Image: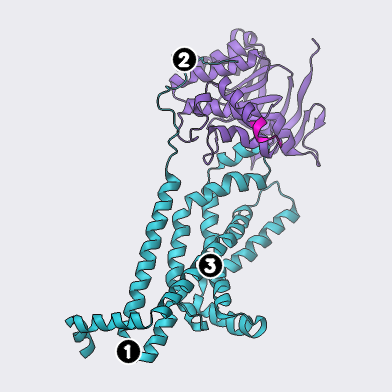
Chain colours: A purple, B cyan
Amino acid sequence: MARENIIEIHHLQKHFGDLEVLKNIEFHVDKGEVITIIGSSGSGKSTLLRCINLLEMPDGGEILYHGNDILKHGIDINAHRTHVGMVFQNFNLFHNKNVLDNCMIGQIKVLKRSKQEAKEKALYYLEKVGMQDFAHAGSTQLSGGQKQRVAIARALCMDPEVLLFDEPTSALDPEMVGGILDVMKQLAQEGLTMIVVTHEMAFAKDVSNRVIFMDQGVIAEEGTPQEIFEHPKQERTKEFLHRFRSAGQ
Amino acid sequence: MEYILMAAAGDGFLSKTWNVFVKYQSLFLGAIQSTLLVAFIGTIVGLLIGLVIGGLRAITSHQDHNQKMGAKLLYKLIYGITGIYVGIFRGTPMMVQAMFLYYTFFAPIFHWSPITSAMVIISVNTGAYMAEIMRSGIQSVDNGQLEGARSIGMTSFQTMLYIVLPQAIKNSFPSIGNEFVVNIKDSCVLNCIQFSELFFVAKSVQGSIFSYAEPFLIVGILYLILTLVTSSILGLIEKRINHQKSSYPASISAPQSGVLKG
């Protein structure tokens, strides 16, 4: 199968005040790829992810989506965001809507789907993440793990081509993490293109096709999970993994 | 002095007060209506003004460093102008606003009646307070809510309308309701433009019976009844708004990890 390039990033730069968060990032995503981005906090991995759907505006470089630079003027940012879904660390479910409405509002208001169609799709994805019985529950009544399942369903309802996960399990109780990772694993197996910022090394190892290690605003090393976890070339990658392993014990 | 002693003695004064109320009851009841009407209209229109002005102030209160020069300037201009409106109407007594606006513009130029003028003045005045209530209500909505909405492609207008404002109104409902209670009481200053609300009627009755105690005791009690009833209704509404929907499926346990059909 020929590789289909969805996202291509060149010379991406971002700074907050004097702090350079992203320095000349080169990065590409192929269709069906599952990419995990690892690195210590402050390395720029979340910022890179947030630049891809323009929740952060880069200061320089280009982001090509199917060959079109989305940083150019006249590009419909909101249309772009429907193609690139996002799952947040803190879920960000709409507090004023119940579970079903959380999954429907984007479909109705942004994609202009009919109520009926939106509801069917919402229920389909809620069932997929195991939350169909909670369709009419208030979004603030759920546990963290349940909220994240709904947040994934909400993102899927928009039929995104790529789904971004920004530390989706970091705010969860430990016993909830496995369930969310299983949902993500299933999505990966179904061929959804995913970019996952995570500290879950086991997930990165087992599920992703490619692992990117970021350090101080640059991509320090990238490769297959085996290359990164078994034979890291860079000294800082080794150090990071070593620190991670000793912290995990 | 004699009067106070008489009042303390009870019977004579209270029955006299009752008689005054019965004799002028159509005036008092009419005044209750106009007081409530003006307070209610003022609160609703004030809320609408507050939503717009407060929304604008919340949006324009911080400039993004990515913005172009023109947008920055526009933001500053809007923030400045709305700030002047809020500052003037919160910083001067409503009585002064009423006297100035009514006798300078509303009566001589627009030929508005006192009640129309009263509604406009109380609306514009309440709007200034509501603008600040809504601004802080909007700013209290968690930024994650905005990011959630933007991430599924909603425009900033849709985000404001469907996600932020409903939460901001809910969060500031106690303050919004409080404005209604305040308006019931403070509408009394509008007697200065011949608007016949409770205080105005009390003054007229006092003029015909040459006695202060009875009419003002009557309107005092009427104000108290209005504010107490309104407060308790608002309390009930507030409880309802905060009431969690009971559709939580209690018999179903949380999904087990690995539950995924598809």
Q: What amino acid is labelled 1 in the image?
A: Ser
Quick check: can you spot residue B54?
yes
C-alpha span from label 1 to label 3: 32 Å
Please identify the residue farthest to the left as the structure is shown.
B9
Quick check: can you spot residue A235?
no
Query: Mark 1, chain letter?
Result: B
Question: Is disc 2 in contact with disc 3, using a CB cutoff of under 8 Å?
Answer: no
Residue position for label 3: B42
> Which of A37 and A235 lies nearest the eye of the viewer?
A37
Residue position for label 2: A246
Which stretch did the figure color magenta? A112-118
Please tell me which of labels 1 and 3 falls first in the chain.
3
Closer to viewer: mark 1 or mark 3: 1
Q: Residue B211: which disc?
A: 1
| Callout 1: SS | loop
With respect to residue B229, does A49 lie above or below?
above
Q: Residue B178: percent from the left, percent from the top?
A: 43, 61
With respect to residue B39, does A145 lie above or below?
above
Q: Local crowd at mark 2 within 10 Å, few (<14), some, or many (≥20)?
A: few
Q: Is residue B141 magenta?
A: no
Question: Is disc 1 in contact with disc 2, using a CB cutoff of under 8 Å?
Answer: no
Closer to viewer: mark 1 or mark 2: 1
Q: What amino acid is labelled 2 in the image?
A: Ser
